[in-house]
Image (spheres, rainbow, N blue to C red):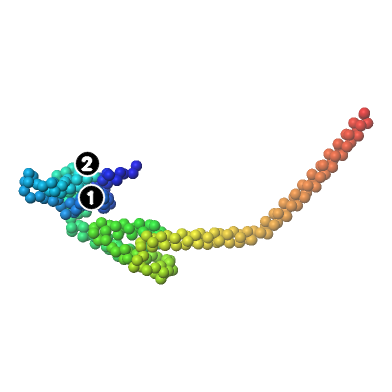
């Protein structure tokens, strides 16, 4: 069953980076001011509660709403860890430290992902879909840590990561497309189309090879087949002669019986 758009995305401790992105947009979609409270911290009015204005209370309410949505997104275990927090920003920051690590840990993870990105190449055994999934995991990981890569660079990186067997297609794309405005989805569509056509050609080539081998095999046994056909024809002729002889004998006996019965009448 699809999750209601009014219910915050659930978080139980797994796949934090995915949940973080979904939760961020959930808050923004409900009220962009809610995300401001999470990112910048709550509004703190001056003076005692009795001195708060209606506008002060409305601004304070934003923190309560954001905090409520975050708590509603947690399972029991996560809630127990976060329940002592008094504002939404405190919850958000604590989640980041808990599931992403300190700044030092984050920098280490960013460094590892950056190294993976720089060394990224298409594996000989993978198709375009698998290559793109692996590429997206790396780039989305960097984006989750605030290291988003411009689309133009992603497009160029992906094109030059293709195997040598894709050289002709790579050259065609570079010559025909403006890489500065080429979208990643458009590039993927072009590569997938080429992959399908390439596979069809390879399959047709295999079928032709199998057909040629079959014809060669038939030619090598063609004499034997003809000999067997001749033998079969001869056997059929002999059998036919024997059947004709038996038919003549039956006709002779039938006629003889008919004459005998006629003489008794």
The image shows residue 87 at horizontal and vertical percentages of: 15, 48
Residue 174 in sight from this viewpoint: yes
- Few, some or many C-alpha atoms within 10 Å of disc 1 (few <14, some 14-19, many ≥20)? some
Compare marks 2 and 1 and give the one earlier in the sequence.
1
Could you tell me which residue is drawn at 81 percent across and 42 percent down?
A: 246
Q: Residue furthest front?
A: 54
The image shows residue 91 at horizontal and vertical percentages of: 17, 49
Q: Nearer the viewer, residue 35 or 45?
A: 45
Q: Looking at the image, is mark 2 or mark 1 nearer the viewer? A: 1
The image shows residue 36 at horizontal and vertical percentages of: 19, 53
Image side of residue 50 versus residue 12, left or right: left
Image side of residue 185 versus residue 214, left or right: left
Q: Write down the quadrant of residue 176 in the picture.
A: bottom left
Could you tell me which residue is drawn at 15 percent across and 47 percent down?
A: 58
Q: Nearer the viewer, residue 191 or 128?
A: 191
The image shows residue 237 at horizontal and vertical percentages of: 77, 50
Mark pair 2, 1: CA separation: 26 Å
Q: Is residue 247 above or below residue 133?
A: above
Mark seen at residue 31: 1
| Disc 1 element | loop
- Count of numbered labels shown in the rendering: 2
| Disc 2 element | helix
Mark seen at residue 76: 2
Contact check, label 2 and label 1, Cβ < 8 Å: no
Q: Is residue 185 above or below residue 171?
A: above
Query: In the picture, which quadrant includes the N terminus?
Result: top left
Could you tell me which residue is drawn at 78 percent across and 49 percent down?
A: 238
């Amino acid at each position: 069953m699809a999750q209601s758009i009014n219910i915050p995305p659930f978080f139980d401790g797994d796949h934090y980076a995915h949940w973080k992105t979904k939760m961020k947009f959930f808050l923004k979609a409900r009220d962009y001011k809610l995300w401001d409270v999470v990112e910048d911290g709550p509004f703190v009015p001056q003076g005692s509660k009795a001195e708060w204005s209606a506008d002060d209370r409305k601004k304070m309410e934003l923190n309560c709403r954001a905090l409520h949505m975050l708590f509603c997104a947690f399972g029991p275990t996560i809630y127990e860890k976060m329940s002592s927090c008094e504002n939404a920003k405190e919850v958000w920051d604590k989640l980041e430290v808990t599931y992403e690590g300190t700044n030092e840990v984050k920098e280490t993870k960013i460094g590892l992902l950056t190294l993976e990105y720089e060394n990224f190449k298409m594996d000989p055994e993978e198709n375009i879909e698998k290559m793109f999934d692996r590429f997206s995991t790396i780039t989305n990981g960097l984006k989750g840590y605030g290291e988003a890569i411009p689309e133009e660079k992603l497009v160029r990186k992906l094109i030059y990561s293709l195997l040598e067997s894709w050289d002709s297609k790579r050259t065609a794309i570079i010559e025909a497309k403006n890489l500065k405005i080429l979208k990643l989805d458009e590039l993927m569509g072009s590569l997938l189309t080429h992959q399908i056509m390439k596979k069809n050609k390879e399959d047709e080539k295999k079928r032709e090879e199998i057909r040629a081998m079959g014809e060669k095999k038939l030619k090598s046994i063609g004499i034997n087949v003809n000999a067997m056909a001749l033998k079969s024809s001869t056997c059929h002729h002999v059998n036919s002669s024997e059947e004709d002889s038996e038919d003549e004998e039956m006709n002779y006996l039938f006629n003889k019986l008919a004459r005998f019965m006629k003489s008794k009448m």
